[in-house]
């Protein structure tokens, strides 16, 4: 008998259309029969190459990275058609895509094969080198357009135009972008080819093992009964998914296809339901240990050990999700919303007993990195453990077909991230070639007139604009290259500066007018996209406040602090989020008057700001608001 109270799952066609609209990955061609087998063989070959390079190979970085891109360019043109309408044509690959696939791959393998000779030539490239470099760059850019979209290409093109306007020759630009580790095969693609790709494969294996549905069920068992339970479920599930997922849009579409219809069914407005999922899914990008894979790039670009970055990100991430959770709670109380019926909520104990083993790969991943293993080796062991634990139950067991699908899905997902990282390398290369970074630093310091706050505000605006429509990893690379040095020059610790630009690059996914995660949620909820983006921004207000706080007081990132100080910061910050949520939602036990809302917001901000005096004042202000609420509530 069908369970009428069970969460609604959109049919496969509906979900596919949503993903097709908002996730470029869905633009892949549909194959069957022998061509499909060939595609899977290519993807498995790529997987084998990745593991060989990570665990065995001792080739120079330039050869490894160019070969990595060469393989992906070939596979990318086979998988991604020139426009969406062609993805429905089965077993059809136009001749020009085959030419582009072969030519693009050949350009990158030309560098790999002739590496020693090209290194000896240095800047004195021969005409053949220049032509091949131009072809490689253009073919890479077209594949990026197909897979990722135009925004990042527009940014990179602007930087290339600037280089020519600054007087640099075609030979010099091509050498910088194609033949050095300051360009396309620079740090971003290096980190992608060694760390990020393995975590993409890990996410693919975890998805195939059913961990996403387990997280939703787990969140339902914890919070499904509470007021507005489905919205709280969305927050918890998105936080858990953020531990391994690398895309706010994919998170929104994946868990949102389940949570958003249920939120609407209990009384949440469509805009609010979509905004909850978008804000929570975007927060997954700041959730350790993976942080949208940007944590590995941050470790490489700052020379700060990865475990230090992951630990430093914990408190800001907890505060982010706490803020959303509390605002959802007060919204539900304000609207008088109830939780899910008891029969629709999984039993927590039984769920952990039968499916708790799905946590093991994540535990192994975090444990090994804590013990000092490199992220790459930790990811390899986590992937192996994901395959092993899948055999614990028949319904999660990997078959040869599902194993091949997991490998293929991981390889497909890698293409988008790699293209974004490669194009981001163009931005890094031009900044390095032209010295543009120093120009921007001098300009901003002149405008800010040594005011750190003004410099941070201008940096925030730049991050929000440059982050529009750009994937997490490429987004961070661009921000770290252009804007982080500006903040560092103002005397901010390196980690705090990089976290600052990372946060504001991430929230571009929910900040109108280009709010991809909010748009994805609005399509599922059938809500107004702009209103959804505005609501998501309000829910995620913590992400706009906390970066300023940890810049002015880095103890929030556990920089130069003590354990008692950390405990105090955690407690007072959570109380501060309580006050901030009351002020923004205008409800506690009953509706909160406007003047009391301002007091609650002020008290919340003071408590979030690390400091003994500010904490005491904040506690008094929030206590005052609470007392007014109790005094104005009639006794029963």
Image: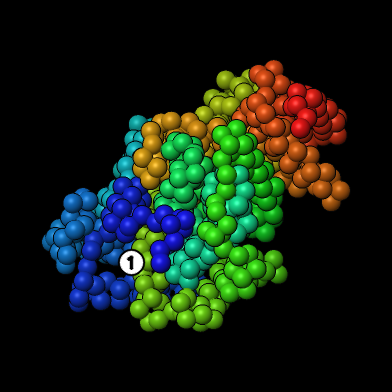
Image side of residue 433 versus residue 128, left or right: right
Find residue 12 and report its image quarter: bottom left
Q: Position of residue 215 (x, y in %)?
A: 55, 61
Q: Name the residue located 29 percent from the left edge and 65 percent from the top edge.
A: 75
Report the colour scheme.
rainbow
Image side of residue 98 versus residue 13, left or right: left
Residue 603 appears in the figure: yes
Q: Name the residue located 60 percent from the left edge and 65 percent from the top edge.
A: 347
Q: Is residue 291 above or below residue 624?
A: below
Q: Where is residue 478 in the image (x, y as percent from the top left)?
A: 48, 42
Image side of residue 249 versus residue 612, left or right: left
Q: Name the residue located 40 percent from the left edge and 63 percent from the top edge.
A: 2
Find residue 596 and report its image quarter: top right
Find residue 520 and report its image quarter: top left
Front in this rendered view, residue 189 or 462: 462
Q: Where is residue 296 in the image (x, y as percent from the top left)?
A: 57, 57
Which residue is tagged 1?
71
Q: Where is residue 595 in the image (x, y as percent from the top left)?
A: 69, 17
Q: Is residue 78 above or below residue 533?
A: below
């Amino acid at each position: 008998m069908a369970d009428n109270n069970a969460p609604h799952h959109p049919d496969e066609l509906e979900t596919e259309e949503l993903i097709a609209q908002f996730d470029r990955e869905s633009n892949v061609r549909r194959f069957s029969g022998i061509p499909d087998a060939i595609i899977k063989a290519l993807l498995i070959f790529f997987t084998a190459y990745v593991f060989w390079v990570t665990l065995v190979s001792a080739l120079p970085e330039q050869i490894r990275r160019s070969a990595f891109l060469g393989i992906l360019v070939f596979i990318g043109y086979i998988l991604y058609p020139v426009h969406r309408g062609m993805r429905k044509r089965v077993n059809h690959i136009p001749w020009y895509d085959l030419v582009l696939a072969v030519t693009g791959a050949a350009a990158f393998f030309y560098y790999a094969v002739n590496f020693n000779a090209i290194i000896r030539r240095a800047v004195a490239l021969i005409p053949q080198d220049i032509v091949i470099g131009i072809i490689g760059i253009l073919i890479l850019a077209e594949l990026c357009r197909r897979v990722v979209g135009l925004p990042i290409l527009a940014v990179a093109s602007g930087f290339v135009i600037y280089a020519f306007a600054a007087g640099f020759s075609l030979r010099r630009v091509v050498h910088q972008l194609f033949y050095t580790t300051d360009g396309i095969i620079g740090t971003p693609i290096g980190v992608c080819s060694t760390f990020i790709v393995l975590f993409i494969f890990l996410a693919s294996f975890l998805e195939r093992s059913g961990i996403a549905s387990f997280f939703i069920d787990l969140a339902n068992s914890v919070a499904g009964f509470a007021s507005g339970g489905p919205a709280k479920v969305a927050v918890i599930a998105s936080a858990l998914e953020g531990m391994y997922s690398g895309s706010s849009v994919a998170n929104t579409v994946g868990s949102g296809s389940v949570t958003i219809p249920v939120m609407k069914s209990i009384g949440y407005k469509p805009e609010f339901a979509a905004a909850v999922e978008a804000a929570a899914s975007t927060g997954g990008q700041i959730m350790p240990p993976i942080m949208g894979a940007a944590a590995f790039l941050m470790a490489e670009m700052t020379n700060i050990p990865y475990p230090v970055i992951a630990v430093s990100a914990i408190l800001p991430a907890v505060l982010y999700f706490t803020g959303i959770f509390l605002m959802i709670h007060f919204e539900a109380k304000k609207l008088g919303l109830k939780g899910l019926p008891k029969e629709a909520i999984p039993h927590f104990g039984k769920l952990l007993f039968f499916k708790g083993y799905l946590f093991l790969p994540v535990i192994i991943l975090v444990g090994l990195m804590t013990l000092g293993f490199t992220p790459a080796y930790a990811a390899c062991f986590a992937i192996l453990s994901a395959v092993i634990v899948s055999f614990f139950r028949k319904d999660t067991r990997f078959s040869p077909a599902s194993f091949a699908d997991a490998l293929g899905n991981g390889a497909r997902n890698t293409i988008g991230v790699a293209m974004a990282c490669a194009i981001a390398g163009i931005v890094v290369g031009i900044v390095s070639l032209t010295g543009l970074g120093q120009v921007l630093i001098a300009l901003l310091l002149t405008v800010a007139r040594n005011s750190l706050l003004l410099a941070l505000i201008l940096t925030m605006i730049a991050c929000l604009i440059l982050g529009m429509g750009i994937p997490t990893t490429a987004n961070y690379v661009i921000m770290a290259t252009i804007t982080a040095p500006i903040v560092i020059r103002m005397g901010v610790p390196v980690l705090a500066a990089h976290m600052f630009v990372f946060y504001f690059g991430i929230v571009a996914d929910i900040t109108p007018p280009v709010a991809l995660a909010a748009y994805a949620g609005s399509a599922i909820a059938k809500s107004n996209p702009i209103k959804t983006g505005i609501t998501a921004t309000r829910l995620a207000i913590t992400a706009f406040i906390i970066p300023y706080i940890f810049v002015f007081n880095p103890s929030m990132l556990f920089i130069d602090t003590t354990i008692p100080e950390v405990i105090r910061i955690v407690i007072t910050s959570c109380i501060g989020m309580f006050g901030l949520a009351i002020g923004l939602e205008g409800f506690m036990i009953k509706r909160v008057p406007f003047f009391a809302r301002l007091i609650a917001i002020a008290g919340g901000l003071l408590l979030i700001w690390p400091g003994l005096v500010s904490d005491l004042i904040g506690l008094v202000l929030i206590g005052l608001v609470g007392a007014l609420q109790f005094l104005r509530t009639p006794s029963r």
